[in-house]
Image (cartoon, rainbow, N blue to C red):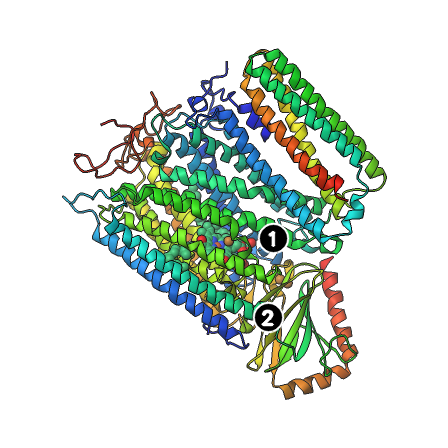
Amino acid sequence: MTQHAQAEVHGAGHHGHVEQNWFLKYFWSTDHKVIAMQYMFTGMAMALVAGFMAYVFRMQIAYPGMNVPFFGHVSPDAYNSLITQHGSIMVFWVAMPVLLAGFGNFLIPLMCGCDDMVFPRINRLSYQLFLLSAIILIASWFVPGGGFGGAWTAYPPLSSVAKYNLTPMGSSMWVLAVAFEFVAFLLGGINFIVTAMNARAPGMKAFDVPLVVWMIVVASLLFMASVGPLIAGAVMLLFDQNLGTAFYNPTRGGDPVLWQHLFWFFGHPEVYVVLLPAMGIVAEVMTVFARKKMFAYRMVIYTVVAVGVLSFFVWAHHQFVAGIDPRMANVFTVTTVLISIPIAEMCFLYIATLYGGSIRFSAPMLWALAFLVEFLIGGVTGIYLGASGADIFFHDTYFVVAHFHYTFFPIASIGTLAGITFWFPKMFGRMMNETLSKIHFWGTMLPFNFIFIPMFILGMSGEHRRIYDYTHFPDLANPAMQSLRIMSTVALVVMLLFQFIFLYNFIVSMFRGKKAEKNPWKANTLEWTTESPPPHGNWQEMPTVYRGPYEYAVPGRDTDYWPQNERE
Amino acid sequence: MSVKTIATQRASMNIPTGRLAVWWVLVSEIVIFGGVLVSYLLHRLAHVEWAEQAAHTNTWAGAFNTLVLLSSSLSAVLAHQAAEKGNGPKAARLLYFTVLGGLVFLIVKAFEWTHEIQLGFTLQSGGFWSYYYTAAGLHAFHVIAGMGVMIWVASTAKKNQELHRVENVGIYWHFVDIVWIFLFPLLYIAK
Amino acid sequence: MILSLPSASTFSGDIDGLVLLVTVLCGVWFFATQVTFFWLMWRFRARDGVKSQYITGKEPHLKKWINIPHTLILVCDIVIIVAAVRVWTKVKQTLPPPDDTIRVVGQQWTWSFQHSGADTTLDTADDVWTSDSLHVAEGKTYHFLLESKDVLHSFFVPVFRLKQDAIPGRIITGWFKATRSGTYDILCAEICGIGHGIMGGRIVIESPEQHASWVQQHSVVADAGAAASDSTTAVAAGATN
Ligand code: HEA
Ligand code: HEA
Ligand code: CUA
Ligand SMILES: [Cu+2]
């Protein structure tokens, strides 16, 4: 990657080129907006795949052994691959590309008031690597032995020894795909950080930068600083799988727990890597639709930084009972529970932002508010798990599954949809249908809670994860618990059906929606000062910035908003 | 004829964009090598028996390579100075000399490894050797990458173009050098 | 106690207590937060002629509504941490002297158990090997030696609230003391391959007398028992390759 980092330095962009045919325009373009869409649509497609997988294995859990419509019989190994791929895809091929790369690419140059990323060709390369990783992953489901089924955490020796996982090719291709994905996001991350640091519009000081950009940059930093060891770890895992090394093999001097440390040292910061962009999106939407200045803007940034720093010292809370030195657990339980302080502060500041506002409940705002409402559930349940004593019981039960879906779904779906519905006019120059958006909102949010609340109860009753059929365990097979499983599956099916309304609305509005003017929401940030959609190069002449992004309802002005680029 | 984006030419932080990027590249690289080295150290400390595996590495070859890399870094510094003075051709010559250093380094390594493999010490022959080949291999890969970039930078510098790149590639090369400064004692001296 | 799940070990009560504490502390804040949130949504909904206010967040009389709860949460956190650590040290960091010892061996995809027999010492002639069912006496303190033959497994006894991963190449020692008799699930809580979904067993908790007589019947046929467990090993091994 260094080669390219170097290659692009100041060489950037055969970029002004007139782009002749559609291929060059949509597949070979270095325009950050096009690349953003590439990430966005790839992520969306992968989300549908992973959502379908969720449907398949949920059906199997609710009605063991049934012939799942549109799939068929779910064998034990198929089940394991399904959950593994579902988890991997949702985190690495949906949440990351959509929230970090998609919105990052679209928003950073537009909100910082420059014409593109600082390294457009690295940017293109990063997407191409990402696409390659996705292709490798999908291909891995069709090789002899099938796709990898050792869980998205890929703990060795199961993941490293073919005779244990029985997916010799699948597991290596999974590691390879994940590794490529990491490299792609490293390249992207460098671009984001440098662009936001160095390419800001004249007059735009660090504290004039919108929160979403701040958060995407901090997220990229977290990713960059935490993923390295896992990249090394992935190489070692590949060697163990294919070259007969013994890094993770206890019988030959290796140590399986090493992987767990490398994975979670990345894995926990990673959850904030996806959390922060969503939080940022919510901040933008809330301020606009409450017509309010962000409550204590700087404090929000400090809490973000605090979360980022703390997140490097909590990883072993995933390994309390994994055979680490029990005394270590005490350290990690302290750091883990304390991380609630900055995050609570952040949530409170968001909520306080509503105070004194004039709130319009348009679709983006509904999603933004729902994000906080649901995320709080995911957050507080994290404390149950962070309390080491309680995690002895909760570890690898459905309580954990419910916990992280109450954090991940708000992020990957609710936050994403808040952003999509909010920036849709800017992305495609047309408005989405408000009514359909609202139907989709309620049709997603209500079932969502019926999917995952039962999982808390099941987890508390001792149901463990990654099991394709609970009838094998007398205590877990009881009818009350089975009916909860069925409830959650039915709710999922309902939710999935409502997603078609979104897809319809999305596609139709893209071509037939009513034309959007420059600034449909009367917002302050720079992206709203150019045409929708912005032309190649974003502005006829580049904007200059005179104030912070959230100057709403400033006393003594007739309009209740004050764009960053207006001198008066 | 390459049309640069406005973004690329801005410098809100008063650091040239290219140099800023190189530093961030190094950050991400540091943690990668950090991961390997910390894993290696922890295991090395936990396994005394690795010491007699380590005894078979050729300290002199390692020492010689350290010297080679250090001097190649020196010529990279001189190249930077030449570039500062706007003397592109001189900078290019010095960069080629640095590349030569990298080449020598790799050749020595090649002999070392073939010898060790002939003695039967391969990736599989125990924990130490696994880390030895992996860590050194990862480093060698970076040396090769650095050489590639340097040749490319030199080719433009020769024409007195994009001279600032000379410094950036230099920064990267120093990093590759420093990584080796860590690897050498850990893999060769510690016996 | 946690919902439908019986509490059958000396520390399951402590863990449930901790869970209850967290529920109360977080619950209070959770509802306080949500209620405020919804109230603000309603109170400040857009109304004609009402302009939103310009608030920076520096106003002391508003900021205190963040700072006070914030310090209180810190207090709650500390309470939670102290409680958590106390439970943790009791379950995982202390080993009360054992009345008896068992060996628990995980392998793809069964649990096999070595009971020490009448002499309460392992690896003697009268040991009883079983697979899939663990027999323990109520009110006795047991040490378990946890091992794995292949990949990671996790020894999970929900009614004990006890969980510990098994790692190949290591012997991990833990303890429990059953407080009520009955037969309950033993699960494997770490994914361990295709058969993870069927890997489990039952724990049979009996009164000391019943347990003694069970040992009686089975130690005489100790060898047969061993043979049996070997055969399960063979089967499992066969399944893996
Ligand atoms: C974006 C995703 C995301 C986020 C944001 C979080 C946030 C948190 N997570 Fe979560 N977590 C995951 C994703 C996430 N997690 C995933 C994917 C797993 C499972 C991986 C796997 O095994 O497959 C996991 C697993 C996991 C575990 C391991 C469980 C186990 O396997 O045994 C633990 C243990 O400590 C934990 C803790 C926490 C904590 C303390 C937070 C904190 O950040 C939460 C802080 C927020 C709040 C606390 C709410 C706001 C505060 C208030 C409303 C005030 C009231 C609060 C108090 C009084 C304390 N998480
Ligand atoms: C972002 C992360 C994410 C998301 C969104 C989801 C979504 C869902 N997950 Fe998943 N899940 C994981 C991450 C996620 N999951 C992980 C990491 C695991 C652990 C795997 C392992 O154990 O190894 C897991 C495991 C897991 C299990 C446990 C399996 C087991 O242990 O046996 C279950 C069980 O019900 C489940 C169910 C669901 C369901 C019903 C949804 C539904 O919400 C699905 C419906 C969602 C959609 C239809 C798509 C949503 C739309 C988007 C995401 C954005 C769209 C994009 C644009 C608009 C641009 N998931
Ligand atoms: Cu053994 Cu899961
Ligand atoms: Cu975590």
The answer as to whether callout 1 falls within 8 Å of ligand 1 is: no
Q: Which of the pair B133/C61 is nearer the observer? A: C61
Q: Which mark is residue A260?
A: 1
Rendered position, A258 above or below A330: above
Q: Position of residue A275 (x, y in %)?
A: 44, 47
Instruction: Inspect this view and state whether residue A30 appears.
Output: yes
Where residue C95 appears, as percent x and y from the top left, is 62, 72
Residue found at the far right of this picture: B119
Same chain, labels 1 and 2? no
Between A205 and C53, the one nearer to me in the picture: A205
**C183 or A350, nearer to the observer:** A350
Q: Residue A502 sits in which quadrant?
A: top left
Q: Position of residue A166 (x, y in %)?
A: 68, 53
Q: Residue at x 75, y 77 (%)?
A: C225
Residue marked by disc 2 = C94
Q: Quadrant of the N terminus of chain A?
A: top right
| Residue A97, above or below A464 | above
Residue kind at label 1, given as amino acid type: Gln
Give the SS element for disc 1: helix
Is residue A1 found left or right of A568 in the rendered image? right
Left or right: A322 with respect to A356?
Answer: right
